[in-house]
Image (tube, rainbow, N blue to C red):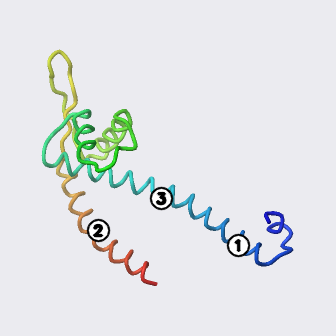
Amino acid sequence: MVKSLKSGSTKNTSVKSKFIAAALKKDKSFSCNFKRVFKALLEFRIVWILKSRSMYGYQLYKYLESINPVPLEFNVSKLYPILNNLNKQGLISAKMDAHGKRKIKIYSTTKKGKLYLESFRKLIPLQTKEFLKYLSW
């Protein structure tokens, strides 16, 4: 069957194989796009949570873990690069605070972060409408 894809001896198998190959290509791009969307939604969620109250990294991780209906697909060490990236973008701020003998970073949303949330909120309904239009082809 796979041989026929190269030789093209049977049209039916060839068409099916090409369709499957195209579907697999789409799956790879879907997987890549899904990761980007997941990261963007996670960043949005972090900025949103920090808008209501300031937290340190581990506390934020535990909160995300408690509100998620399914287990998180990453551990706490993956959260800190995201927090640093959001801090560099100016969407959140990090302030050092004494916690017993240790110093910890307390994260909170900045004014720029609040503007980001507002623009994201306005964008979602537009994207949803476009997506639904796409599905109804």
Label 1 or label 3, whichever comes before in sequence order: 1
Q: Is residue 91 left or right of residue 25?
A: left
> Mark 2 or 3, which is nearer the eye?
3
Q: Which mark is residue 105?
A: none
The answer to whether 22 is drawn above or below residue 133 in the figure is above
Kindly identify the amino acid type of the residue bearing the numbered disc 3: Asn
Q: Residue at x 43, y 79 (%)?
A: 134
Residue marked by disc 3: 33
> Mark 1 or 3, which is nearer the eye?
1
Instruction: Label 2: state its secondary structure.
Output: helix
- Give how far across and how far down residue 28 sits, in percent: 57, 58
Residue marked by disc 2: 123
The answer to whether 4 is drawn above or below residue 53 in the figure is below
> Mark 1 or 2, which is nearer the eye?
1
Label 2 or label 3, whichever comes before in sequence order: 3
Q: Quadrant of residue 72?
A: top left
Kindly identify the amino acid type of the residue bearing the numbered disc 1: Lys
Instruction: Label 3: state its secondary structure.
Output: helix
Residue marked by disc 1: 16
Specify the quadrant that holds the N terminus: bottom right
